[in-house]
Image (tube, helix red, strand yellow):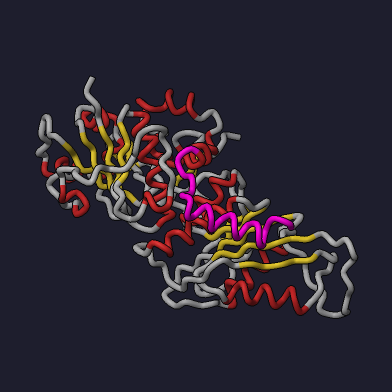
């Protein structure tokens, strides 16, 4: 029996890469392929090998040298073949472009008749920055197998992530040193992940106001007493708050607020932020190590607050098994009201799904076809998996 392969191409930031590896792995399972992972962005430096007695890393001598430069316009791209109506009967490999800028023809990947053709191709090369698992659940040929694999529909990434992504020794050392030093002895751990999609670095007062409004409204943090000096009880409950953000300003504001004023309920609150890189530098080894360590540390929280649209937050919530409180994306630099809501499931959001009925060959709302695939809380056009109510 000949082996068929799926090559995952390193692309985009760490959160996106983790989500797309998980998506590629599930697709490889469904199509009986061997997953090979491009090591270009330091995969081996971040993760242990997940499969015993073998490697998932693409060999350095892989003969298709130009695959990292493939894009939606490349002649090797399957979507481009469909557009030009030149589909070769038995090519050695096909490139699949499933990134955010993919075309309507690229999206035909999710149609069953195209899946039948792709099953005949020995090598598929994939580039994506999307968690495209929800749309796999809409392909009829895979539905029965997916239902067997994941009876709990909202735990797909939770299981895939915990199976695939184990920190390397270097990253595990960073995780354990930080956890033992700052987090281990608290009665309760709260994770707050702040990602601001703004051209300026911040910190922004409206974001600070939003996080405080969310955490206090949802009783994740106590209010502070600004009127009367108080003495905390001797055996006060302790809560540690792990803040992750590219900017240190939010952490400093929280820390000062809870240092300068006692809590209204007597709890002792401490804040910690492992790093503040200021800018995303996905090509730097230590930046990626810190990002992976912080994602993992967040996943060890007892409760979590995450930011809309952030794949960093999606990975942390999926690994944790928690349904976090999601901070809605601010508009016009104003804190939203309500500031947050608890998500329907811990599943990540597919940010750029197709809206196409393959049989009828027309547009359709793919978030309303089956009860377990619905629209995301933070992105109205996105798709996510939920447990049907």
Residue at point 35% right, 40% down? 24
User: To which quarter of the image does residue 216 belong?
Assistant: bottom right
Q: Could one spot residue 373 in this view of the protein?
A: no
Is 286 on the left or on the right of 266, as rendered?
left
What is the x, y in percent for residue 241? 67, 63
Quarter of the picture holding the N terminus: top left
What is the x, y in percent for residue 196? 49, 68
Q: Please check the rendered image and state whether residue 178 is part of the magenta-colored stretch, yes or no.
A: yes
User: To which quarter of the image does residue 34 belong?
Assistant: top left
Magenta region, residue range: 163-185
Residue at point 46% right, 73% down? 278
Residue at point 16% right, 40% down? 82
What is the x, y in percent for residue 81? 14, 42
Q: Could one spot residue 334 in this view of the protein?
A: yes
Front-most of residues 153 and 65: 65
374 to 283, vertically: above or below: above
């Amino acid at each position: 029996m000949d082996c068929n392969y799926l090559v995952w191409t390193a692309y985009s930031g760490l959160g996106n890469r983790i989500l797309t590896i998980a998506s590629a792995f599930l697709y490889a399972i469904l199509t009986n392929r061997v997953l090979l992972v491009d090591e270009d962005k330091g995969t081996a430096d971040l993760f242990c090998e997940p499969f015993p007695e073998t490697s998932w890393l693409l060999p350095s001598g892989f003969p298709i040298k130009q695959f990292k430069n493939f894009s939606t316009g490349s002649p090797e791209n399957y979507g481009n073949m469909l557009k030009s109506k030149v589909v070769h009967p038995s090519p050695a490999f096909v490139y699949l472009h499933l990134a955010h800028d993919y075309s309507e023809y690229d999206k035909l990947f999710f149609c069953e008749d195209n899946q039948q053709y792709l099953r005949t191709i020995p090598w598929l090369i994939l580039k994506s920055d999307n968690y495209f698992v929800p749309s796999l659940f809409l392909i009829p040929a895979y539905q029965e197998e997916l239902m067997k694999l994941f009876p709990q529909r909202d735990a797909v990434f939770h299981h895939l992530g915990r199976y695939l992504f184990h920190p390397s020794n270097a990253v595990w050392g960073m995780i354990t040193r930080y956890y033992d030093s700052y987090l281990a002895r608290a009665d309760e751990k709260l994770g707050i992940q702040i990602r601001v999609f703004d051209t300026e670095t911040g910190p922004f007062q409206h974001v600070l106001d939003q996080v405080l409004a969310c955490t206090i409204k949802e009783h994740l943090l106590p209010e502070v007493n600004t009127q009367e000096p108080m003495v905390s009880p001797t055996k006060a409950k302790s809560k540690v708050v792990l803040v992750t953000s590219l900017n240190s300003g939010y952490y400093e504001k929280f820390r000062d607020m809870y240092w300068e004023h006692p809590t209204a309920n007597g709890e002792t609150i401490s804040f910690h932020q492992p790093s503040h890189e200021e800018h995303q530098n996905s090509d730097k080894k230590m930046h990626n190590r810190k990002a992976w360590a912080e994602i993992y540390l967040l996943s060890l929280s007892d409760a979590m607050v995450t930011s809309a649209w952030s794949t960093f937050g999606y990975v942390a919530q999926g690994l944790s098994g928690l349904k976090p409180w999601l901070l809605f994306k601010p508009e016009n630099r104003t804190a939203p009201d309500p500031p947050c809501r608890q998500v329907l499931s811990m599943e990540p959001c597919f940010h750029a799904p197709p809206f196409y009925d393959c049989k009828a060959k027309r547009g359709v709302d793919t978030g309303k076809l089956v009860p377990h695939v619905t629209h995301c809380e933070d992105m109205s056009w996105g798709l996510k998996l939920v447990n049907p109510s």
